[in-house]
Image (cartoon, coloured by chain):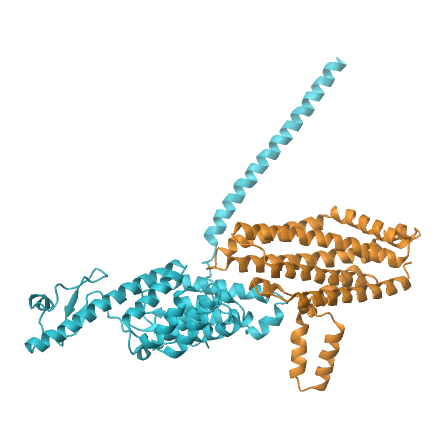
Chain colours: A orange, B cyan
Amino acid sequence: MNAFATQLVVLAGNTLRELVRSKLLYNLLIFAVLLIASSMFVAQLTIGQWDRIILDMGLAATQIVGMLISILIGVGLVAGEIDRRTIYPTLARPLSRGTFLLGRYAGLLLVLALNVLVMMGVLGLVLHMAGYGISQTALQAMLLIFIELAVLSAAAIFFGSFTTPMLAAAFSLSLFLIGHLLGDLQAFGKRSHSEAAKLATSAAYRILPDLGLLDLKAQAASNLPVASHAVWTGALYGLSYAAVLLTLAVIVFRKRDLK
Amino acid sequence: MRLQAERVAATIVTMQRNAAALAGIAALVALVAATGFVRQAAEEARPPAVELAIDVPPFPPAVARPFSFGLRSLVADLTFLEAIQVFGARKSNITLAEGLHEDRLLAKLLTYSTDLDPKFRGAYRFAGDALPRHTTDGMEGGIFAAETLLKRGAVERADDWQIHFLLGFIESYYLEKREEAAVQFAAAARLEGAPAYLAMLATRVAAHAGDLAFAGQLAQTMLAQSSEESTRAEWQNRLLDIAMERGARDLDAAVVRFRAQTGRLPERLDALVSSGIIPAIPAEPHGGSYFIDALGAVHSTHGERLQIRNKAQNQAGVIPQ
């Protein structure tokens, strides 16, 4: 293992250990688990199709809580450390700024993966208690939720590399909201008679992440099969977008004056 | 002497601590009592609760869809749950006009749900079960709304045999669209999970729609399909109505024979038995009894006779606005 990989693994491990002690993480995780568990009771209000209500609530809880963890914790990993000036001892070591960012990101991804696994376990348990199994589409939806969280974490790291924690969180949250509006925004642009509106929506569609491509919750709730090709291309799109954001973050962070 | 003074001082300190602890406990008890008292006063002063009326969301599905930020399926669930609440609160033995508001609301909520999530199988099935309503004034409500939703469901969820079956049922039972119903039953029969008798039903429907025995078979099938308690009760009642109509039709035929033999109408139904035309007057399945009016028409003391034929004249569909 070369020096870069070793440093990356050490940093990711440290970040994981640090985050595992975070009260915010546990609060959010407990909230999600309670929400998923309560879906069993909400499902009893409906007639048939309990699995749909449980899946809808469970996948929504996984996505929303995962989004909050990605943004609130992701922003704190870089922007928060700069704000608190705790980044200096780390950067004083023989460690490049790029490695620092990527290590932090890898640690956050590990935490998110654990969270998604825990929530998937609870969701599977609740479904089992209601007499249902977890479908392949639900697993595909979970995978794409994790990829979406990877994009949002990369966005939080990117924004955190050049602005304050508060602004970075606001930008990341906006990216999440716009990312889910993008498909409709593009449709609006196509229907518009204004050339400027068409240009603006087309540019926004090309630049911003289309998180709708990573959303299989409705298909999972309706138990509709999804071609694995669609899942893998969506996942690849999300990962490549996250890679672009991380590269930008590294470039910006290397040039940033931390004094 | 000094030791004694220290002991006294220690005792005083202990007493002071105990006193402070006691004062703390007393303050806590007083606070709890005061909170209870204030709560009672607040409950008495509370203004009357405002009932939150269930209604469709104030913004159209076209707006709700993008602004649910990827959670449109969950929003569709919420309006579906509202529809179930409306259905649960709707009284069963009411006239068409009395239930019109609930009928419309139910249709609107289910349309909203399926607009948000066009693949919502449960909402289509529920529309087929819950929207059609037999009223106490001999009308049928919600038929057109159910047909509209189920037609859309049959396209969006072409893989669901129950949606095709429900659409076929509504088209044959209420609307007398025999050919269209046969197509739906045939489509349902081809799908995975469909019961074997559906293929037979598909072939029979074109030839026997409007027939009482056929209506009985359909109602029996609907009873077997329904999982919701009030819907099952409604279909059980419907089966009794059909049995009542069967008895009334037998008596109608006997009256025609009596008139052919005697040249007059019987004054009472007993005359049909005493003249040997029928062995006995059939039992009225609801527990009432049959009687004949001055024009020779047979009725039941239970209520209006079921009209299976010419149902198109009796429909009062509710089209979502």
| The quarter of the displayed image where residue B75 is located | bottom right
Residue at the location (58% across, 37% down)?
B28
Residue A85 in view, yes or no: no
Does A107 sit above or below residue B286? above
Q: Is A67 displayed left or right of B82 in the figure?
A: right
Is B31 in front, or is B71?
B71
* Residue B177, position as x, y percentages in the image: 37, 78
Residue at the location (41% across, 66% down)?
B129
Q: Is B267 displayed left or right of B6 in the figure?
A: left
Residue at the location (62% across, 70% down)?
B67
How many numbered circles does the render carry? 0
Does A93 sit above or below residue A67? above
Residue A37 in view, yes or no: yes
Residue at the location (19% across, 65% down)?
B301
* Residue B214, position as x, y percentages in the image: 31, 70
Does B267 sit above or below residue A65? below
| The quarter of the displayed image where residue A221 is located | bottom right
Is A103 in front, or is B225?
B225
Is A77 in front, or is B201?
B201
